[in-house]
Image (cartoon, rainbow, N blue to C red):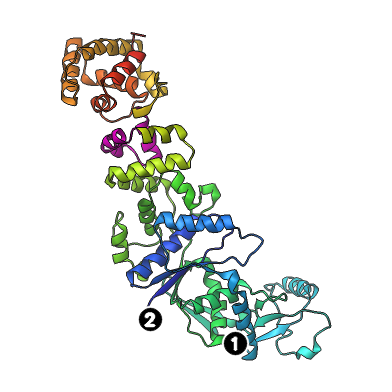
């Protein structure tokens, strides 16, 4: 183990921070924190046509929201292009790379001939040992690395085990284009070396790249970082997670009402395990985390499980923290009515949250459940409440409204006692009193305890709402 562990997360800013990338970042971050090392962020923005400032900001915002703070300033890969070119020319000087003067037409013919022969479309190395003096005039060359012609390259991977690649299957890949810009393979190796990265944790779709990158490491005489190639996340049907499965960016999960701690917990279990533990704090994850605990089999994303995990974290959260999450989310998704209502009724919302928390699995559901506090009269009941508010139920509400009007003590015990007495005189069970009241008071059939609702919104508002939906109207 190196004296100091350094991990990195290196996304390309061509879109949102997708959930697979977030999991990779989580594993890299957790391992660095576990080992007392550093977690670095590198933005691989060399694809200038597709990289955008908006995507960079989405990645930064997504990581911050998830609580995955990186150490130091982010490294911007494109700004390091001169350093990448410097290494390419050093490989030339070492005899580990060479100029290739093939034209696009030659390369196209080469690929077609290989396909016709039933072989992979690979470069045939025709300029590997030729004298550059033979170069055709006016052709700007690329620089290619010299892959070994014989033997094997072994990747000792913490997840995949020992993976052996025959060097005969590796071609002399381009490391510097004819315009002097570096390719991905070169840039990644140079950046990881210069950043001092000791452990690379990434998706197993990069496993073949690892063999090619080791050729560059060896060409420079650099130490190869330890590697862990994690299986990609799959959808419920076992296929690679995609948009058709509902694959979303991290910001979408925030807008759907998931808590960052819950998403961290759920993502950790998608590809890593510690015994049978399903629910654990971030501190526990860091304490338990090890590369040996990463799973070799692909994990399947399950929204139902994520909701259940999120529901657990909502139940365990402090009301003050949830209130801030509700207010922030309402503002972010443009729910102006809820934003205003939450801010104008903060004390009441905080008082109601212990009753609301067991009933919600997302922050959006919490916002919906809290609407009874600030909803504007007359309340428009939803379909389930309409079904409850039958003529008989409205008559019952009207009768209890008269009882409540004369009630001196507006407390939960006093209202509860009055309801039980009224139910007995009417020959009804308490539920036949409570549910129509709930529908009238909230417009829904799910809420905190109906007597708690009445106390939370106050006597005047409660009596007015019952009157609106009873036979008094």
Instruction: Judge whether 265 appears above or below 359 on screen.
Output: below
Residue 336 screen position, x and y as percent: 46, 34
Residue named by callout 2: 2
How crowded is the residue under tag 1: few (<14 C-alpha within 10 Å), some, or many (20+)? few
Question: Which secondary structure lies at badge 1?
Answer: loop
Q: What residue range appears in magenta? A: 345-372
Q: Is residue 59 visible?
A: yes
x 37%, y 58%: residue: 269
From what the image shows, is residue 354 above or below residue 124?
Answer: above
Judged from the image, the secondary structure of the residue bearing numbered disc 2 is loop
Give the answer, above or below, for where 89 lies relative to 401.
Answer: below
Horizontal and vertical percent for residue 156?
Answer: 45, 78
Is 358 magenta? The answer is yes
Main SS class of the magenta portion in the image: helix
- Residue farthest front in this picture: 344
State yes or no: residue 388 in magenta.
no
Q: Residue furthest top?
A: 472
State the quadrant of the C terminus: top left
**x then y, percent, for residue 305:** 37, 48
Q: Earlier in the sequence, mark 2 or mark 1?
A: 2
Q: Nearer the viewer, mark 2 or mark 1?
A: 2
Considering depth in this image, is 334 or 361 the residue closer to the camera? 334
Q: Residue at the location (34% across, 26% down)?
A: 445
Tell me the CA gap for discs 2 and 1. Answer: 31 Å
Residue located 36% across and 37% down the image = 366
Tell which of 311 and 10 is nearer to you: 10
Find disc 1 in the rendering and name its residue: 150
Say which residue appears at 51% left-offset and 79% top-offset: 194
């Amino acid at each position: 183990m190196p004296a100091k562990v350094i991990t990195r997360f290196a996304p390309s800013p061509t879109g949102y921070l997708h959930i697979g990338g977030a999991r990779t970042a989580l594993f890299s971050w957790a391992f660095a924190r576990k080992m007392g090392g550093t977690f670095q962020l590198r933005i691989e923005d060399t694809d200038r046509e597709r990289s955008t400032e908006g995507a960079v900001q989405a990645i930064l915002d997504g990581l911050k929201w998830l609580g995955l703070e990186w150490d130091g300033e982010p490294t911007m890969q494109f700004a390091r292009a001169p350093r990448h070119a410097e290494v390419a020319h050093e490989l030339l000087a070492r005899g580990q790379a060479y100029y290739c003067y093939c034209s696009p037409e030659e390369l196209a013919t080469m690929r077609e001939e290989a396909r016709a022969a039933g072989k992979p479309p690979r470069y045939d190395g025709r300029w590997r040992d030729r004298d550059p003096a033979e170069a055709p005039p006016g052709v700007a060359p690329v620089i290619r690395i010299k892959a070994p012609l014989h033997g094997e390259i072994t990747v000792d991977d913490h997840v995949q085990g020992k993976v052996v690649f025959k060097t005969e299957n590796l071609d002399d890949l381009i490391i510097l284009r004819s315009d002097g810009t570096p390719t991905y393979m070169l840039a990644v190796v140079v950046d990881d070396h210069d950043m001092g990265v000791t452990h690379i944790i990434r998706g197993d779709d990069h496993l073949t790249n690892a063999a090619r990158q080791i050729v560059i490491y060896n060409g420079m005489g650099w130490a190869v970082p330890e590697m862990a190639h994690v299986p990609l996340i799959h959808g419920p049907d076992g296929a690679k997670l995609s948009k058709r499965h509902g694959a979303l960016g991290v910001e979408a999960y925030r807008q759907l009402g998931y808590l960052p701690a819950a998403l961290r917990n759920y993502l950790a279990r998608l590809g890593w395990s510690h015994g049978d533990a399903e629910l654990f704090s971030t501190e526990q994850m860091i304490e338990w985390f090890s590369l040996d605990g990463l799973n070799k089999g692909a994990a399947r994303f399950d929204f139902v499980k994520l909701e259940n995990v999120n529901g657990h974290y909502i139940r365990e959260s402090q009301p003050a923290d949830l209130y801030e999450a509700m207010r922030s989310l309402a503002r972010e998704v443009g729910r102006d009515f809820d934003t205003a209502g939450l801010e104008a009724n903060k004390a009441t919302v905080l008082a109601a949250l212990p009753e609301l928390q067991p009933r919600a699995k997302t922050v959006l559901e919490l916002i919906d459940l809290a609407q009874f506090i600030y909803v504007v009269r007359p309340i428009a009941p939803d379909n389930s409440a309409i079904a409850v508010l039958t003529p008989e139920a409205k008559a019952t509400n009207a009768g209890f409204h008269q009882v409540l009007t004369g009630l001196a003590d507006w407390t939960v015990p006093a209202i509860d006692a009055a309801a039980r007495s009224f139910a007995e005189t009417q020959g009804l069970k308490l539920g036949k009193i409570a549910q129509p009241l709930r529908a009238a008071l909230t417009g829904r059939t799910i809420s905190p305890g109906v007597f708690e609702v009445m106390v939370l919104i106050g006597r005047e508002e409660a009596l007015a709402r019952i009157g609106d939906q009873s036979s008094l109207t």
